[in-house]
Amino acid sequence: MGSAYATAVQDLIDALGRLPGIGPKSAQRIAFHLLKADPEESRRLATAITEAKERVGFCERCFNLSEGPLCTVCSDDRRDAHVVCVVEEPRDVVAIERTREFKGRYHVLQGAIDHLQGVGPEQLRIRELLARIGEEQVAEVIICTNPNLEGEATALYLTKVLDMPGLTVSRIASGLPVGGDLEYADELTLGRALEGRRVVGGAGAGDPAAG
């Protein structure tokens, strides 16, 4: 049975429906909103998407989103280069920055270990993280992956590969809902999880005062 909508409308609904978190009904509502809205609003949205794709890439150092070779965090000399917070996606950087608790730098893995989806350590930015530790004299790595199966598997793997002299490896404290995402945590909860991080490996392992 064919679609009840004109081809162009159905194509728009289908394109919106492929976006994460947008189901068929939401895609339909957004499409109808855009079609009813002032043409200038639709043009602004189309231009914003096109310009973002053209101008935004990944930071050469941490793989956060950036409009230049380095992102705004890596370009800030006031940040503590000796402490690196490892996250899964750029959106997690935004969540942690909202807390105003973290003054170091980041490393974005661009995903998490998920063997069911064919994502292993070699698909993540782990090699680049290991290189940074020596080059930037990193003293502590804070593992801040999501509290779900994929995030925990990634954290466990990182704890093993980061077991090296002179490096403290810590993990954000519990308190975040299991199975959730960092981006949905409120600033206070995430800030406390960051402050209460526990040492899980490296030079500080076994030292209650570390971290």
Image (spheres, helix red, strand yellow):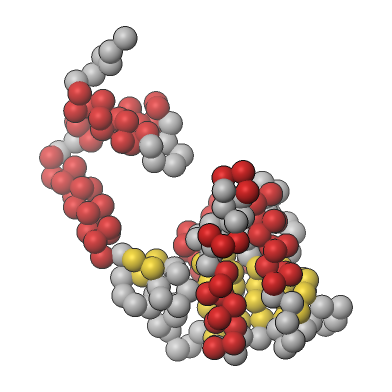
Quadrant for the C terminus in the image = bottom right
Quadrant for the N terminus in the image = top left
**Which residue: 19% across, 31% down?**
35
Q: Is residue 209 left or right of residue 105?
A: right
- Regarding residue 54, the answer to whether it shows in the image is yes
Residue 112 appears at what percent x and percent y?
A: 58, 56
Residue 6 appears at what percent x and percent y?
A: 19, 20
Q: Is residue 206 above or below residue 159?
A: below
Residue 9 appears at what percent x and percent y?
A: 22, 27
In this rendered view, identify the residue nearer to me: 15 or 37. Answer: 15
Give the quarter of the image for residue 137: bottom right
**Which residue: 65% across, 73% down?**
142
Q: Is residue 86 left or right of residue 26?
A: right
- Regarding residue 211, the answer to whether it shows in the image is no
**Which residue: 57% across, 69% down?**
126
Give the quarter of the image for residue 117: top right
Residue 93 appears at what percent x and percent y?
A: 50, 65
Label total for image: 0
Q: Is residue 26 left or right of residue 45?
A: right
In this rendered view, identify the residue nearer to me: 137 or 118. Answer: 118
Residue found at the far left of this picture = 39
